[in-house]
């Protein structure tokens, strides 16, 4: 299970970028109302940066920035033991943000990331051979920072998204079609229609350009 206790199965920086683009594209197809989506990706967030995010509308979220130096991820499970609302201090748990490298420290003051609501943070520079996190003394518990819960989607298994989407969107979501996007194959009109008969490539084009996901134009 992926968590801050074991990040060995977490994707590489490039793999994470592709997967978050796939997740955002799947949500854009299935849920045409942007406000109702879980996952988003902005390939033009800043001149040299891209940003992926998840918000569940109930206080849980993660944000991921891809920069020329690598990738930075912060998350918040608002019901976890280490959440500022539950940890007895009203503040971020000690150690979570202390060791963030200088190349990523500007993100700690980014208003869009709600850094005051943080239960875990991981990062990886292009010089690193693995993902890293701070020197944190976690309280006793199965998932005290909520990272196992929020990072489970990154196991790279199309079944994980399919099962989640079927429960959340109350509709069948083909594992085969999810795999098509997980492999970053160009999106076609037929794939879009199979995922959502009410959607089409033409109306998705702006979303796809923002996300940076490849598609076959008609």
Image (cartoon, rainbow, N blue to C red):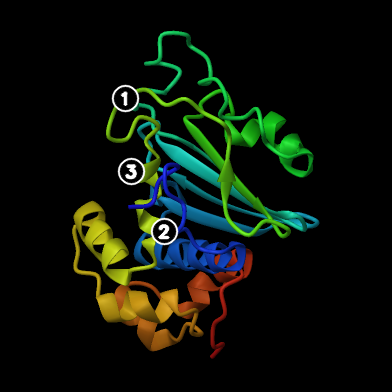
Residue in view at x 68 percent, y 36 percent: 100
Relative image position of residue 98 (x, y in whole percent): 65, 27
Q: Which element carries disc 3, helix, strand or loop?
A: helix
Q: Is residue 124 above or below residue 192?
A: above
Separation of disc 2 and disc 3 at Cα?
Answer: 11 Å
Screen quadrant of the C terminus: bottom right
Q: Is residue 98 above or below residue 156?
A: above
Left or right of 192? Residue 99 is right
Q: Which mark is residue 68?
A: none
Check contact, mark 1 vs mark 2: CB within 8 A: no
Residue picked out by circle 3: 149
Secondary structure, mark 1, is loop
Per the image, label 2 sits on a secondary structure element best described as helix
Label 2 vs 3, first from the N-terminus = 3
Q: Residue at x 32, y 52 (%)?
A: 1
View extreme (bottom): residue? 218
Marks 1/2: CA–CA distance: 24 Å
The one nearer the camera, 83 or 178, is 83
Q: Which residue is mark 2?
A: 154
> What is the x, y in percent for residue 140?
31, 25
Viewer-closest of 127 and 165: 127
Q: Residue at x 47, y 8 (%)?
A: 89
- Of labels 1 and 3, earlier in sequence is 1
Q: Residue 140 got which mark?
A: 1
How far across and down, in percent of the image, does residue 120 sit? 49, 35
């Amino acid at each position: 299970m992926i968590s801050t206790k074991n990040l060995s199965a977490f994707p590489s920086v490039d793999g994470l970028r592709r997967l978050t683009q796939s997740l955002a594209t799947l949500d854009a197809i299935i849920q045409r109302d942007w406000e109702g989506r879980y996952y988003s990706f902005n390939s033009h967030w800043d001149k040299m940066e891209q940003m992926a995010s998840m918000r569940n509308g109930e206080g849980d979220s993660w944000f991921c920035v891809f920069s020329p130096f690598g990738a930075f991820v912060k998350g918040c499970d608002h019901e976890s033991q280490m959440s500022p609302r539950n940890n007895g201090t009203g503040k971020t748990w000690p150690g979570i943000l202390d060791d963030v490298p200088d190349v990523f420290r500007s993100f700690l003051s980014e208003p869009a990331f709600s850094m005051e609501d943080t239960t875990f943070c991981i990062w990886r520079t292009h010089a690193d051979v693995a993902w890293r996190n701070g020197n944190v003394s976690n309280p006793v518990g199965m998932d005290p920072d909520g990272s196992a819960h929020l990072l489970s989607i990154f196991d790279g298994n199309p079944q994980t998204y399919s099962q989640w989407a079927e429960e959340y969107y109350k509709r069948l979501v083909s594992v085969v079609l999810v795999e098509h996007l997980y492999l970053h194959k160009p999106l076609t009109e037929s794939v879009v229609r199979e995922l959502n008969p009410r959607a089409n490539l033409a109306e998705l084009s702006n979303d796809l350009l923002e996300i940076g996901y490849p598609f076959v134009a008609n």
